[in-house]
Image: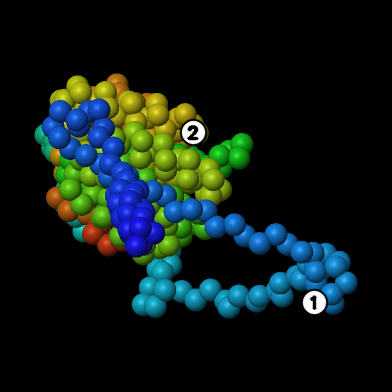
Amino acid sequence: MEYVLIAIGILVVLLIAGIGLLTSRGRRTTRLDDDAAAGTTLTRPRPPAPTEEPAPTGATASGLGLPPETVEAPEVELPPVEPEPGLLLETPPPSAGRLVRLRSRLARSQSSLGRGLLTVLAREKLTEDDWEELEETLLAADVGVAATSQIVERLRTQSMVLATASGAELRELLIDNLTAVLGPDLDRTLGTDRHEGRPGVLLVVGVNGAGKTTTVGKIARVLVGDGKSVVLGAADTFRAAAADQLETWGERVGVLTVRGREGGDPASVAFEAVRTGIEGEADTVVIDTAGRLHTKAGLMDELGKVKRVAEKQAPITEVLLVLDATTGQNGVVQARVFTEAVDVTGVVLTKLDGTAKGGIVVSVQRELGIPVKLVGLGEGPDDLAPFEPRAFAEALVGEG
């Protein structure tokens, strides 16, 4: 009986000890110093015990204990790349001869200028009143005072010829004089070619409403039509949907668009666009910038920053200023302010097919010494053309 009682006592002691041991081996909690005052605790579960992988025996299927042979994976032949369903890339026409094809649109909008000039010159004998009328016609077309004086003086010296000239000869004479003041010897080539392993970089600037982003998209089409590979940089991060608009232009001709978040740093977008162009060995990178109010000094300083940051990757080979031709002489004021912020190398005149006065081409070039390199003659995607002085003068005068 004593042994039974002793055994029962031992079992009770062991049972109590076991319960205490199980309680002490429960989950642990650690109170972080920063959260202790607030009473917050983070529970840290015990990590699972690592599982040991069985050591290799060196045995093979043959049982000889030799190391296993390396089995080469068979070559996999990938199927040909198929274009995305429903995506049809457009093929823009080349830039050569575009202005000639679009000349009729310019002639329709500028017909009053050509008719006015030819009407005066066709008179049998030109009086001082006639010469004044000729000057007024040219000034009304935004040709500018200096260019108007040059044209009139040249025509005065040819007054004897004018008296006996036929209508076709008068037209040709007027075209020659207009061509002379349009700067036929100015360099109008675009810096779009690769140089020393880096792409040509075009920076496009301008005020709001001039059609800048649309012009960037059309420039991409011109370059693609000439067989160049292009990368677009949507550095206009301040205008809502500007990046979406530019991306749509690029998608239509298979051009990549680099963009950032809305309201982000435009300089960083320009930097990434140039870097992407370098890595992808593109021919040209075209960067769209935010529309600037030429009276806001802070915005103009930001434009200078975009240019400096982009040039850390590659030199800017072309800075194009987009001007609305319908603004007349105010466009010359805008252009002058932009030249103080960046080195403008060329001008793009948009909306020349509407109520614009063609003489603005002469004013911009003569007063700023910057050539007009591209002109926009419509709303169509391929209505941007390289500027050709002779063809432009012919369109201004109209058909004979």
* 330 or 54, nearer to the observer: 54
Q: Secondary structure at mark 2?
A: loop
- Which residue in the structure is indicated by mark 1? 61
Q: Secondary structure at mark 1?
A: loop
Residue at screen point 35% across, 58% down: 2
Amino acid at dot 1: Ala
Label 1: how many Cα within 10 Å (few below 14, some 14–19, many 20+) = few
- Residue 154 on image: x %, y %: 32, 32
Image depth: mark 2 or mark 1 in front: 1
Residue at screen point 48% across, 53% down: 49
Q: Quadrant of residue 271?
A: top left
- Residue extending furthest toward the front: 1
Q: Is residue 73 above or below residue 343?
A: below
Q: Is residue 93 visible?
A: yes
Mark 2 and mark 1 lie on one chain; the one further toward the N terminus is: 1
Amino acid at dot 2: Gln
* 92 or 201, nearer to the observer: 201
Q: Is residue 145 above or below residue 218?
A: above
Q: Are marks 2 and 1 in contact (CB under 8 Å)?
A: no
Q: Is residue 128 above or below residue 20?
A: above
- Residue 84 on image: x %, y %: 42, 74
Q: Which colouring convention does the figure follow?
A: rainbow
Residue at screen point 32% across, 26% down: 304
Q: Quarter of the image for the N terminus: give it.
A: bottom left
- Which residue in the structure is indicated by mark 2? 313
Q: Is residue 154 visible?
A: no
* CA distance separating discs 2 and 1: 58 Å
- Residue 264 on image: x %, y %: 26, 38
